[in-house]
């Protein structure tokens, strides 16, 4: 009897738990649990999915999973050493971003269309072992990265009219590239021996040359009839020949006239092009011209080794050295001070580290500083003066009373403020990248502490290009405050700036060593890391609801594009601004 009561109690408890689970599912809280658990079953011991426990993938504890209103909208599992099929993840009907690059996933990719994946915008499945045909009809898909797999067949079933980033290179695809896909560069299709058509070499078709045998061989009677007709119409044939010759002559004359017209047009176009190039070249000062400007400024400016720019004409090195100073911050690159001059003017002085910048005494550093002194933009901190003499390297900027983005993230920012800051920083970096200079300017150290806030709370990018002259750029790999689900492979590999772990804000090509120099592409990577940190950290709960969530997901997508591992896959800052403008 006791045993019976015990069994009945167990059954009641099991029934209660089952009802609870089904109740949760019925309420729409965990509809995405089965596909996620099905995918996890291929990798039960994977480090990246150790946190996938419980019945609520939207609890915030599932690393690599992002949710909105109780539904999974993003899965981020790059470089996670995963195997198995990707199909379960594509059963997530609300997923917008799926990035599972550089794993060992295999099998076929199921057909995808608006009925199966209406919310899918970014599909990144490159560097796996996927195979089969590609069948995608997703009008809203923005990104498809499927390179370095084993897909075969043609591209006739691929329709992605809104895609901006598309790559199916290094597969086993064949056939002709259809008209819509031909807008992408040849690098999007390279490594597929069977593919042809624009932008690759055109396809070669074989045509049958066999015709009706009766049209080739004729009977003797027919030949005689033909001969008689030919002789009777000899006069007409001569007229036809004369007419044809006259038409040919007229045609040749017309062609000559057209050729002359084209040559004249090309001459005018090239002359205008050269003139515009000369105008653009004149707007970028040469090194020789910069040296002349520097000599003039040293004569008219502060003297004593202090080179002054617009807004810093009244600065003197003696006044700076005598000013009362307050330490604002210290780092590997040097120390920053708040200096109050005798006349009450407040400036910020960056004193570069003698250890890191021991080799910055040459003309290259001076030339860069003189270019940086010409930067004038509402979102770029203006360099008012600099000193590079007798081992002393000082940079003088306006003082920003509201501090840096780094300090504000620690205190918390509402969503509107975060949007405005990242937008302003993007405009500042884009201005630096498009400034007319030879060679093109690079910031080289984009991070929250170098994004300052003016008295109106607007972002200003500071210290343009300074770190290009540091002795060891790898020492500046500061660790961002990202949630681990954004980069599970890096979070699992440790926190150092060395190989395999976090690169921090520095792009992988810089953090890996080898003497690589900062580029505009590495600036884009650093901005992407800042963008992800601003979106995911240091925020205050707002009441924007779905609109804020949609904007946040848009920011995440842009951040992921900016932090692509290969530099050539990253967008330019102008493109980043265009994408941000779509939803901000």
Image (spheres, helix red, strand yellow):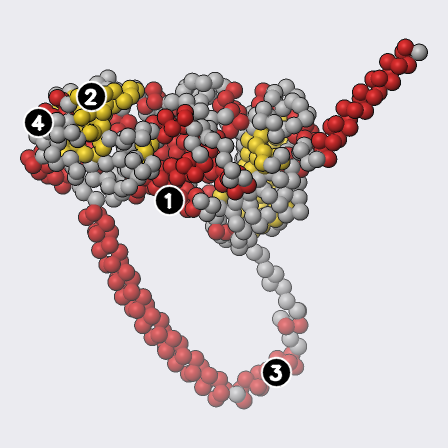
Crowding at dot 3, Cα within 10 Å, few <14 / some 14-19 / many 20+, comes out as: few
Residue drawn at 46 percent across, 83 percent down: 240
Which numbered tag is attached to residue 224? 3
Q: Position of residue 104 (x, y in %)?
A: 59, 28
**Which is closer to the viewer, label 1 or label 4?**
4
Question: Mark 1 to mark 4: distance in Å?
Answer: 40 Å
From where the camera sits, is residue 103 visible?
no
Q: In the rendered image, which residue does mark 4 sit on? A: 304
Q: In the rendered image, which residue does mark 2 sit on? A: 325
Question: Mark 2 to mark 4: distance in Å?
Answer: 20 Å
**Which is closer to the viewer, label 2 or label 1?**
2
Question: Mark 4 to mark 3: distance in Å?
Answer: 109 Å
Q: Nearer the viewer, residue 326 or 55?
A: 326
Per the image, label 3 sits on a secondary structure element best described as helix
Q: In the rendered image, which residue does mark 1 sit on? A: 574
Crowding at dot 4, Cα within 10 Å, few <14 / some 14-19 / many 20+, comes out as: few
Question: Mark 2 to mark 1: distance in Å?
Answer: 39 Å
Residue drawn at 44 percent across, 24 percent down: 481
Per the image, label 1 sits on a secondary structure element best described as helix
């Amino acid at each position: 009897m006791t045993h019976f009561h015990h069994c009945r109690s167990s059954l009641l408890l099991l029934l209660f738990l089952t009802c609870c689970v089904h109740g949760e599912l019925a309420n729409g809280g965990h509809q995405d649990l089965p596909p996620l658990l099905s995918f996890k079953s291929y990798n039960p011991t994977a480090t990246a999915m150790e946190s996938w426990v419980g019945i609520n993938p939207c609890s915030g504890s599932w690393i690599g999973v992002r949710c909105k209103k109780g539904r999974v909208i993003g899965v981020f599992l790059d470089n996670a050493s995963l195997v198995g099929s990707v199909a379960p993840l594509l059963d997530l009907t609300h997923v917008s971003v799926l990035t599972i690059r550089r794993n060992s996933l295999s099998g076929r990719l199921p057909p995808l269309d608006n009925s199966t994946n209406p919310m899918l915008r970014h599909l990144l499945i490159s560097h796996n072992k996927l195979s089969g045909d590609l069948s995608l009809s997703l009008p809203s898909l923005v990104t498809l990265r499927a390179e370095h797999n084993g897909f075969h067949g043609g591209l006739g079933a691929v329709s992605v009219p809104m895609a901006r980033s598309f790559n199916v290179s290094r597969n086993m695809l064949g056939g002709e590239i259809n008209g819509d896909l031909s807008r992408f560069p040849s690098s999007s299709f390279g490594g597929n021996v069977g593919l042809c058509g624009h932008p690759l070499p055109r396809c070669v078709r074989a045509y049958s040359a066999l015709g009706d045998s009766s049209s080739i061989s004729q009977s003797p009677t027919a030949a005689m009839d033909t001969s008689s007709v030919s002789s009777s119409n000899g006069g007409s044939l001569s007229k036809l020949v004369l007419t044809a010759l006259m038409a040919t002559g007229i045609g040749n004359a017309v062609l000559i006239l057209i050729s002359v017209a084209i040559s004249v047009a090309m001459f005018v176009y090239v002359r205008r092009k050269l003139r515009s190039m000369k105008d653009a070249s004149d707007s970028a000062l040469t090194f020789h011209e910069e040296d002349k400007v520097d000599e003039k400024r040293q004569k008219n400016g502060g003297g004593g080794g202090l080179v002054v720019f617009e807004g810093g004409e009244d600065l003197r090195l003696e006044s700076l050295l005598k000013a009362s100073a307050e330490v604002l911050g210290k780092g590997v690159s040097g120390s920053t001070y708040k200096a109050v001059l005798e006349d009450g003017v407040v400036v910020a002085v960056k004193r570069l580290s003698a250890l890191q910048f021991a080799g910055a005494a040459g003309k290259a550093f001076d030339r860069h500083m003189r270019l940086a002194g010409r930067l004038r933009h509402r979102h770029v901190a203006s360099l008012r003066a600099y000193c590079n003499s007798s081992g002393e390297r000082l940079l003088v900027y306006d003082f920003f009373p509201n501090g840096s983005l780094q300090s504000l993230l620690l205190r918390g920012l509402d969503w509107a403020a975060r949007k405005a800051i990242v937008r302003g920083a993007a405009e500042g970096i884009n201005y630096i990248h498009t400034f007319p200079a030879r060679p093109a300017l690079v910031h080289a150290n984009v991070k929250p502490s170098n994004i300052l806030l003016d008295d109106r709370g607007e972002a200003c990018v500071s210290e343009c290009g300074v770190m290009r002259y540091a002795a060891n750029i790898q020492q500046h790999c500061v660790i961002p405050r990202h949630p681990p689900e954004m980069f599970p492979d890096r979070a699992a590999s440790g926190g150092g700036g060395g190989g395999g772990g976090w690169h921090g804000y520095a792009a992988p090509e810089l953090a890996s060593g080898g003497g690589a120099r900062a580029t505009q592409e590495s600036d884009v990577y650093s901005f992407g890391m800042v963008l992800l940190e601003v979106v995911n950290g240091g925020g205050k709960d707002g009441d924007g609801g779905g609109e804020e969530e949609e904007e946040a997901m848009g920011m995440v997508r842009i951040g992921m594009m900016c932090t692509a591992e290969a530099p050539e896959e990253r967008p330019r800052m102008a493109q980043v601004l265009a994408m941000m403008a779509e939803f901000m």
